[in-house]
Image (spheres, helix red, strand yellow):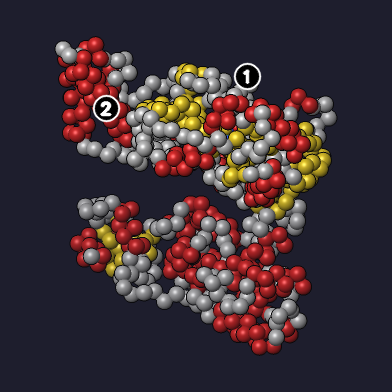
């Protein structure tokens, strides 16, 4: 056999293996195959056939040699062909200037040296290897010499192409970049973790690293990861002469090259870039812990070379850190606008990320307990972006024994009302809907478009009315005088009158809107509408028993519970009374006839139905606007009698309730 044939076969085999691996990944990991099973089988068959004919070409990692189609479940070591170095740090302008002098000496020149400044991302460094345009391996940095094979996990990241595109695809390419998680997505992930009772991540960097090192790539796939590429290791088939050209070439290949890289002619420009990014840092969606300064030209980099762990041609100019250590001197409890009680740590003031902080959130009692945070503890505090500073963890090694655990209060620290902790929730809440901490937000909701739609009464005006006194709770709106409005900023007689008119008009809003306006937890517009249709009047709703609420189709036990609690609450009842006194009509709903053919009719079932279960029948009745109840009374309109009816049949006859059979019923709901 000629070596030419062998070479051709070997190339074909390689290609088949890459394609099969790629389709395995689409199928098993992403649940999103791109080809049919038959097409997949054809590829597999061809590969098997070739390997049968040329057994010397069989390799242990061929897809034909694996029992399952999934890759192994542990991370294999991957030696980096060139070490993945770290960076020297500079913490002030002086240190940057010193670095620049060293570079000048190293190159033996006093001439200007082209520099590039770019963000230093705070994530997890990885290397990707592309052979003939296909992603064949991805690894973590590890100790810089040997990393871990996380190819399958990296393949789940949408920013990482499985295949390079463009006209100049190199034969071989190693790129390095930073896998990171955006701040907002990190917060979301932690919220989800907390809900599931799983471990929280201390910061986005840990979340990114933890997500990358999952044994099951499906878990990685469910985590919102991104990558920025900032460096090329070895490359064959394409020449690159500078960093900026490289970034452009990477983008053309479909890789996500790091953004905001800027050419700098002097250190002045570098410092200006640093200052600009320091300001932007707060608004960036991801964490940046400094800037990286790099010599632009690769020939100069070559000349400069590297020290043991860091290249001489680059330096990191760090931002002030996001995390600091300080002491908790006390714990306060804040009541949020939804009534949620949040423990907040009072701190010995400390500068974090350029800002002095003296308070940081502890989130809730579960987190406080889980992290075992005590008054007197030294703790790691962290602030990032717009996020409220938080206590990350205590440093138990610094305890003296004088630290005290904190217990959440049983009553609201603002109004003194009882506090409850609803089942399944991590937060305690104040039960008083007129609690000053909650009421302002409630009034804003009440007046908003989807609720009572009081035109002109926006949040700013409500703030003023609240601060100056006329508004203490929602029903006060209906006792407002024009004169009270006229004293406020930018409020002439005409606009004051308009608002009084708008308040007047809101008295006619239909019941569903008012129920929504009451701001009951879990009661959105739709649920409010369902309640209005079901009960028709506010009085009926206020009297509803818990079981009645639970029986309503579309209303689950949690919602039923909060609605029931709301109307049991003395404070709520008072406010509804005052709203009525103020003239709010709580207009009963006019049910739409269409699609609600059973509206106003009530049904009771007895015996077995042959075409559906009794539950299903009740649901159908409710869907059509009727009521389905289990107890018979003179108010019942129909008793539906199935096979083997019980004692209800006689009772119905006594009560003169109309009895119908299953066929009649089906006719009615048809
Ligand atoms: S260049 C040989 N550029 O910082 C120099 N690194 O402290 C290679 N990093 O391990 C690094 N953003 O994980 C470079 N724009 C950037 C970077 C960056 C973040 C990380 C990288 C590296 C670490 C060094």
| 3D distance between C-alphas at marks 1 and 2 | 39 Å
Ligand 1 position by quadrant: top right
N-terminal label among 1 and 2: 2
Q: For the point 36% across and 62% down, which residue is it?
A: 622
**Residue 276: which disc?**
none
Of badges 1 and 2, nearer the viewer stands 1
Q: As rendered, which of 485 and 152 lies closer to the eye?
A: 152
Note whether ligand 1 is within 8 Å of mark 1.
Answer: no
Q: As rendered, which of 187 and 286 lies closer to the eye?
A: 286
Q: For the point 53% across and 80% down, which residue is it?
A: 508
Which image quadrant is residue 154 in? top left
Report whether 596 appears left or right of 191.
left
Element type at marker 1?
A: loop
Residue 551 image offset from top left, x and y in percent: 43, 56
* Figure check: 628 above or below 447: above
Q: For the point 20% across and 18% down, which residue is it?
A: 4
Neighbours of disc 1 within 10 Å: few (<14), some (14-19), many (20+) = few
- How many numbered marks have been drawn onto this rendered protein structure? 2
Residue 370 image offset from top left, x and y in percent: 65, 33
**Which of the image's four quarters has the N terminus?**
top left
**Residue 15: which disc?**
2
**Which of the image's four quarters has the C terminus?**
bottom left
Which image quadrant is residue 665 in? bottom left
Residue identifier under label 1: 308
Report whether 410 appears left or right of 141.
right
Neighbours of disc 2 within 10 Å: few (<14), some (14-19), many (20+) = some
């Amino acid at each position: 056999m000629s070596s030419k044939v062998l070479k051709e076969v070997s190339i074909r085999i390689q290609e088949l293996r890459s394609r099969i691996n790629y389709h395995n990944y689409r199928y098993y990991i992403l649940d999103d195959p791109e080809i049919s099973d038959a097409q997949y089988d054809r590829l597999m068959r061809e590969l098997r056939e070739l390997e049968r004919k040329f057994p010397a070409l069989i390799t242990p990692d061929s897809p034909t040699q694996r029992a399952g189609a999934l890759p192994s479940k542990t991370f294999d070591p991957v030696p980096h062909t060139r070490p993945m170095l770290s960076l020297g740090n500079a913490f002030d302008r002086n240190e940057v200037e010193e670095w620049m002098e060293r570079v000048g000496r190293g190159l033996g020149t006093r001439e200007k040296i082209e520099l590039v400044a770019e963000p230093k991302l705070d994530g997890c460094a990885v290397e990707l290897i592309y052979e003939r345009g296909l992603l064949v391996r991805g690894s973590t940095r590890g100790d810089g010499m040997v990393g871990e094979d996380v190819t399958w996990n990296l393949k789940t990241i949408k920013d990482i192409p499985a295949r390079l595109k463009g006209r100049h695809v190199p034969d071989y390419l190693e790129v390095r970049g930073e896998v990171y998680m955006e701040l907002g997505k990190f917060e979301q992930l932690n919220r989800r973790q907390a809900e599931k009772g799983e471990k929280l991540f201390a910061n986005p960097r840990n979340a990114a690293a933890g997500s990358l090192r999952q044994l099951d790539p499906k878990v990685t796939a469910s985590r919102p990861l991104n990558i920025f590429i900032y460096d090329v290791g070895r490359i064959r088939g394409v020449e690159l002469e500078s960093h900026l050209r490289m970034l452009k070439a990477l983008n053309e290949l479909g890789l996500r090259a790091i953004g905001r890289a800027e050419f700098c002619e002097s250190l002045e420009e570098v410092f200006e870039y640093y200052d600009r990014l320091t300001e932007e840092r707060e608004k960036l969606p991801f964490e940046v812990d400094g800037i990286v300064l790099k010599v632009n030209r690769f020939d100069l980099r070559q000349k400069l070379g590297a020290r043991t762990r860091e290249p001489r041609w680059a330096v990191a100019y760090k931002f002030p850190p996001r995390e600091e250590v300080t002491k908790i001197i006390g714990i306060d409890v804040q009541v949020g606008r939804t009534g949620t009680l949040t423990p907040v740590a009072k701190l010995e003031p400390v500068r974090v990320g350029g800002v002095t902080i003296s308070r940081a959130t502890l989130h809730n009692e579960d987190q406080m307990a889980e992290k075992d945070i005590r008054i007197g503890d030294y703790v790691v505090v962290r602030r990032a972006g717009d996020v409220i500073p938080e206590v990350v963890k205590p440093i138990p090694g610094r305890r003296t024994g004088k630290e005290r655990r904190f217990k959440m209060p049983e009553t609201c620290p603002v109004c003194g009302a009882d506090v409850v902790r609803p089942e399944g929730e991590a937060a305690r809440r104040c039960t008083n809907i007129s609690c000053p901490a909650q009421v302002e937000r409630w009034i804003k909701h009440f007046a908003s478009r989807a609720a009572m739609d009081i035109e002109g009464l926006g949040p700013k005006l409500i703030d003023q009315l609240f601060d100056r006194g006329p508004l203490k709770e929602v029903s006060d709106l209906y006792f407002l005088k024009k004169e009270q409005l006229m004293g406020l900023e930018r409020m002439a007689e005409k606009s004051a009158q308009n608002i009084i008119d708008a308040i007047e008009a809101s008295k006619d809003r239909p019941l569903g809107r008012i129920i929504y306006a009451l701001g009951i937890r879990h009661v959105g517009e739709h649920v409010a509408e369902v309640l209005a249709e079901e009960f028709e009047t506010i009085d009926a709703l206020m009297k509803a028993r818990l079981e009645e609420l639970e029986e309503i189709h579309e209303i689950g036990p949690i919602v039923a519970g909060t609605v029931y609690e709301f109307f049991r609450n003395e404070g709520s009842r008072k406010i509804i009374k005052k709203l009525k006194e103020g003239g709010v009509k709580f207009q009963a709903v006019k049910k739409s006839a269409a699609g609600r053919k059973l509206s106003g009719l009530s049904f009771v079932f007895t015996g077995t139905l042959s075409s559906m279960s009794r539950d299903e029948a009740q649901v159908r009745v409710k869907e059509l606007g009727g009521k389905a109840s289990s107890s018979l009374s003179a108010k019942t309109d129909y008793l539906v009698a199935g096979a083997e009816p019980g004692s209800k049949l006689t009772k119905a006859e006594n009560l003169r309730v109309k009895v119908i059979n299953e066929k009649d019923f089906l006719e009615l709901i048809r």
